[in-house]
Image (spheres, grey):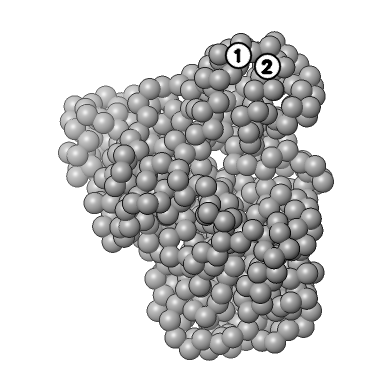
Amino acid sequence: MSFSAPLKGFRVHCGGSGPAVETALDRLRMLEAEVDAARPGPLSLIGPGVSAEAGLRGQFPENLVQADCGIMALHGRSEAQPRPLGVDYVSVLTGIAAVQGMLATTLAQLRGNPVSRVELGADGVALFAVGQYIAAATADEDPEGQEGTPSAARPPFVSADGVAFEVEAFSGEAWQRFWASLGTPERAIGRGWRPFLLRYERASVSLPRELHEAAESTSFEEIRSIAASTGMHVCPVRTVADRRTDPDAGSPPWSFRAGRAAPPGSGATAGLPLAGIHVVESTRRVQGPLATRLLSLLGATVTRIEPPGGDPLRGMPPMAGDCSAKFRVLNDGKRVAEIDFKQAEGRAEVLELIRDADVFLHNWAPGKDIELGLDAATLHAVNPGLVYAAACGWGDALGKNPPAGTDYMVQAYSGVADALTHAGAPPRPTLMIMVDVAGGFVSAEGILAALVARQRTGRGGEVTTSLLAAADALLHEPSPAAVDGVFAAADGLLAIVTDDVDALCSLLGISLPSSEELPDAITKALGTRPVADWARRLGPIAVPVRRDLGTLVSRHPGRFERNGCAIATSPWAFS
């Protein structure tokens, strides 16, 4: 085997089906395990000295979980109307989480810990995925409520020649220069900046119409040129078909590179699978911190490098005690080392910190590691057994000078925005943080695979993941049932998923209509009674669409702990 084939010599057995299982099998296959999907029984990974098993609890039709865990409410927040995402988001994340659990179990056994089984359910994964929004809705101080006003003037923008595009700005100065160069009125530029800046946190944005009018009067090539000269970033909104023609489409989501021979990793005979593993991170925003939060829930000790005075995002409202609720949910339980690594003394502190670490993760801009003198070669000279991990936006897909690799930009380029959109409507990214979350899952998955490779080969190495690769995973073709939608009852919305139309109509007390008339017939029947009544009558094929994220905590009491806000607990249970 090699460092880039961590599961070479392993076999996967599974007799199950569905998008979560298919996702897990695809990813285990890309890690070079031999997959036998015809053998009945649970998802299991068997290799030299290792036998790991994953149990996926319960049946979880995608849209029922999206409805029950607040995802539909977040996706439709800008329209003030809950909507399904249109992709198997929860199922794909659950498949990745199953692989993470199996890799962690494999690593544990290789290190002497007898843990052999992991269990997880889609509800736990879904609640974890929207954990930042639940934390904001349950913060002790000024909890964030849902947006109630529909917004028509939201991104993407459309140029004079009909190109839909997303924009990204990292400073108010770049924002002002760009829109001023397009002839936008000064007042509209100022009114648009704060809502644009907070769109990630709120999953909603309403921008001045004048911004759209300025874009609509300018060709896309001119917009690109102005963006390049003003520090703005733009990206066209592409289709799934566009993405599938790219040379890198279909590539594995992780890039591995072996390092030098190193002493074997430390052992652990008890506890969570990553007990005794030390991770050092220098990351910001969501993708990187979420990856290390997942690793900490698997038992790793995480030390977070922050600038002197702490990460400014600690003060982002709403607050949970003395810390931002959204920051806390990503970083709770991590150690903090305040280091200015732009100075020689700070870089020396980083090198000392990683001397005995197992993993170093950063999500710096391309080339920043070399500029800082904290690249893989430098760190491996200090610690040959280190897994050096980078969580980036684009990987190598867009060359040396790509546009900003942020959630909505990657949604636009990757085709995810297209996949989320109803047939006949122009592609539009969701304003819910989605690709960043998937990117954190993929980064943690790659790190776990690299740790297994290190344990098996006796070499440190590198692993690189990207938001673009995470977005690609979300393009899994959904398989809707005969009835799979959101319908209005007398006092709210109900998600229904079933293939048994006859049984559904019987429960609704209606005769079987034609397929064209079926949606209207369902809606007419549901309108006679409240949601709670229908939920009881229809049973497991129907779930009320949850709009108030704060109520999710009482509905799933075992899935949260409290530290100034509700924080989603581990999606895994090991035995």
Q: Residue 312 versus residue 465: which sits nearer the camera? A: 312
Q: Amino acid at mark 1?
A: Glu
Residue ID at (63%, 79%): 356
Is 233 above or below relative to 121? Answer: above
Q: Position of residue 7 (x, y in %)?
A: 66, 75
Q: Amino acid at mark 2?
A: Ala
- Give residue 399's quadrant in the image: top right
Q: CA distance from mark 2 to mark 1?
A: 7 Å
What residue is pinned by disc 1?
186
Q: Which image quarter is the N terminus in?
A: bottom right
**Residue 352 falls left or right of residue 527:** right
Q: Position of residue 474 (x, y in %)?
A: 58, 47
**Residue 359 falls left or right of residue 146:** right
Residue ID at (62%, 46%): 471
Is 189 above or below relative to 505? Answer: above
Q: Position of residue 437 (x, y in %)?
A: 53, 50
Q: In the structure shown, which secondary structural element does the residue marked by tag 1 occupy? A: helix
Q: Is residue 360 visible?
A: yes
**Residue 191 falls left or right of residue 394:** left
Number of other residues with Cα within 10 Å of mark 1, as a class: few under 14, some 14 to 19, many 20 or more:
few
Q: Is residue 498 visible?
A: no
Is 300 above or below relative to 177? Answer: below
Q: Which image quarter is the C terminus in?
A: bottom left
Number of other residues with Cα within 10 Å of mark 2, as a class: few under 14, some 14 to 19, many 20 or more:
some
Q: Residue 400 versus residue 532: which sits nearer the camera? A: 400
Label 2 close to label 1 by CB (< 8 Å): yes
Residue ID at (78%, 69%): 378
Q: Residue 29 versus residue 311: which sits nearer the camera? A: 311
Q: In the structure shown, which secondary structural element does the residue marked by tag 2 occupy? A: helix
What residue is pinned by disc 2?
180
Q: Position of residue 308 (x, y in %)?
A: 57, 56
